[in-house]
Image: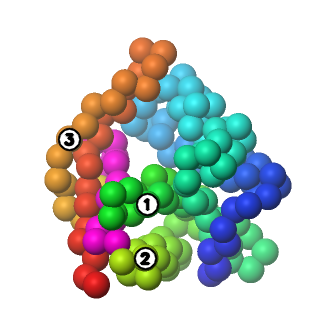
């Protein structure tokens, strides 16, 4: 698998397409389709991703296996730590070790940049992802409820993993 940093409008469009597909398939068991559509538009549309990359210092990466895009992730340096903002593998590609390869890439990125931790937010009802993160060495460090507008909130755990220098 290769992780390719997203730079072009075509790559951004590919991430947005993949996000819409994955979010609608995965999150419908946790939140309403109305909230999913709102969040895709607000956080994972072409406009939102372009702004995150160009104005907010987020880095997006496409996970590619041969000619297929199997997932994507997004990170941002934050006060000496790496914020793992997005981390998704398409349903048909789950269970093939891509998430483990991507996590190794993220940890290596952290070490090369001398960052002490990786941290992320995860919906408190997203039990399968929480279990994966715990298996990868992440600890639940606190809870967070964030108002994202339109009457919606993100009700999350904040998880963190220390990265040895």
| Mark 1 touches mark 2? (CB < 8 Å) | yes
Circle nearer the viewer, 3 or 2: 2
| Mark 1 touches mark 3? (CB < 8 Å) | no
Q: Is residue 120 magenta?
A: yes
**Residue 113 badge:** 2
> Label 1: few (<14), some or many (≥20) within 10 Å?
some
Which numbered disc flags the more N-terminal residue, 1 or 3?
1
Describe the element under mark 1 as helix, strand or loop.
strand
Which numbered disc flags the more N-terminal residue, 1 or 2?
1
Q: Report the residue at 28% width, 71% height from top.
A: 116
Q: Is residue 111 magenta?
A: no
Describe the element under mark 3 as helix, strand or loop.
strand
User: Can residue 109 be seen here?
Assistant: yes
Task: Return the residue found at the far top.
Answer: 151
Which numbered disc flags the more N-terminal residue, 3 or 2?
2
Report which residue position mark 3 lands on: 143
Q: Report the residue at 50% width, 46% height from top.
A: 26
Magenta stretch? 115-128
Compared with residue 58, is residue 46 higher up or lower down, i.e. above or below?
Answer: above
Residue 87, x across and y down, in percent: 49, 58
Compared with residue 21, is residue 79 higher up or lower down, i.e. above or below?
Answer: below
Figure coloring: rainbow
Residue 141, x across and y down, in percent: 17, 53
User: Can residue 91 be seen here?
Assistant: no
Q: Is residue 94 left or right of residue 77?
A: right
> Label 2: few (<14), some or many (≥20) within 10 Å?
some
Q: Nearer the viewer, residue 33 or 137?
A: 137
Report which residue position mark 1 lands on: 77
Q: Report the residue at 34% width, 48% height from top.
A: 121
How far is disc 1 from disc 3 in space, using C-alphas? 21 Å
């Amino acid at each position: 698998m290769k992780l390719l940093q997203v730079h072009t409008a075509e790559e951004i469009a590919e991430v947005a397409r993949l996000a819409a597909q994955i979010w609608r398939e995965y999150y419908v068991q946790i939140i309403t389709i109305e909230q999913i559509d709102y969040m895709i538009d607000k956080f994972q549309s072409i406009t939102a991703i372009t702004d995150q990359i160009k104005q907010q210092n987020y880095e997006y990466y496409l996970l590619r296996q041969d000619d297929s895009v199997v997932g994507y992730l997004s990170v941002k340096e934050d006060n000496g730590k790496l914020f793992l903002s997005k981390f998704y593998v398409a349903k048909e590609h789950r269970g093939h070790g891509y998430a483990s390869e991507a996590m190794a890439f993220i940890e290596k990125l952290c070490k090369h940049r001398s960052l002490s931790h990786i941290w992320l937010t995860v919906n408190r009802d997203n039990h399968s992802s929480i279990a994966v993160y715990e298996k990868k060495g992440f600890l639940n460090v606190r809870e967070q409820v964030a108002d994202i507008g339109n009457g919606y909130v993100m009700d999350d755990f904040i998880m963190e993993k220390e990265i040895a220098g």
